Image: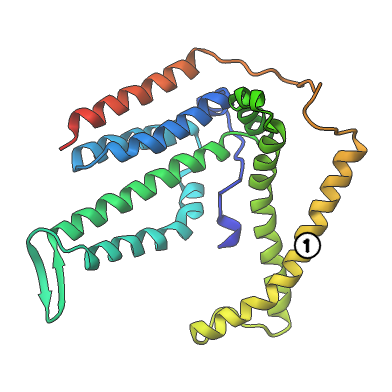
Amino acid sequence: MLQNVIIGQYYPASSVLHRMDPRSKLLASFIFIFIIFLANNFISYGAAALFTLFVLASSKVPAGYLYRGLKPVFFLVFFTLLLHVFMTKEGDVLFSLGWLKVYEGGVIQGLYISLRLMLLVMMTSLLTLTTTPIDITDGLEYLLHPLKKLKLPVHEFALMMSISLRFIPTLLQETEKIMKAQMARGADFTSGPIKERVKAFVPLLIPLFISAFKRAEELALAMESRGYRGGEGRTRLRELNWQLRDTLAIAALALLAAVLIFTRS
């Protein structure tokens, strides 16, 4: 399961999304996060879902690859649905069994929140699937450039975010390797009570932290040996180029926002 996590992964392909400017993809992700909260009925959520499916198809990321990567999120989505179904007491009673009552408002609210969570995860995952960590760093630094007037370390912040995203799959692979090594020595992570399973994961933390610190030190030494001294005076091998497709992507999100506002209850 850890190998299938797609957060921080880059999937190489030749698609419109891969060729877009990283600044437009970052802006589009932020805009989508805000406008998805405008949806509050089945029509508006349907429009947002259709838009998301169209973007997924445009990315040329295989559906199976995306499905395997989103499988760990399904439990959280299902738990969110159940939480709203049994805790929200609005509307007519659909089901009653003693003290347990399921209300119409709880089912509808659970479906809305679960769908919103899935759409957010899919759209934000596409950002890292179609953008290399270097491009994300350059895009973030450019978008945050006005904050330099406030003496904020914009370049360092963008680099930190990029390294963090890149280290997610690396640490997951390291966790998988340590788990297999300990399972070969008799450790059991899959059976027994929940309390025992949690205890079994505790011995993973020390070697995982040691490995993370070691990798961080190796990265710091590699950057220093290559003459890295911060963002001042640095040049880029590839300049960012905003094109018509980037403008059309932002315009499409503006159109989606207008549709969501128009179809709101």
Dot 1: element: helix
Residue 225 versus residue 201 in the image, above or below: above
The figure's colour scheme reads: rainbow
Residue drawn at (57%, 22%), measured in percent from left and top?
A: 21
Q: Nearer the viewer, residue 143 or 25?
A: 143
Residue located beneath label 1 in the image: 211
Residue at the left extreme of this rendering: 92
Determine whether, in the image, residue 239 is placed left or right of residue 222: left
Is residue 217 toward the left or the right of residue 248 in the image?
A: right
Q: Amino acid at mark 1?
A: Ser
Q: Is residue 239 above or below residue 125?
A: above
Instruction: From the viewer's side, name the closer residue of 6 and 79.
Output: 79
The residue sitting at 60% across, 33% down in the picture is 131
Location of residue 179 (image quadrant): bottom right
Q: Identify the residue at image location x=73%, y=83%.
A: 185
Residue 48 position within the rendered picture, expressed as x and y whole percent measured from the top left: 31, 36
The residue at the far top in this view is: 244
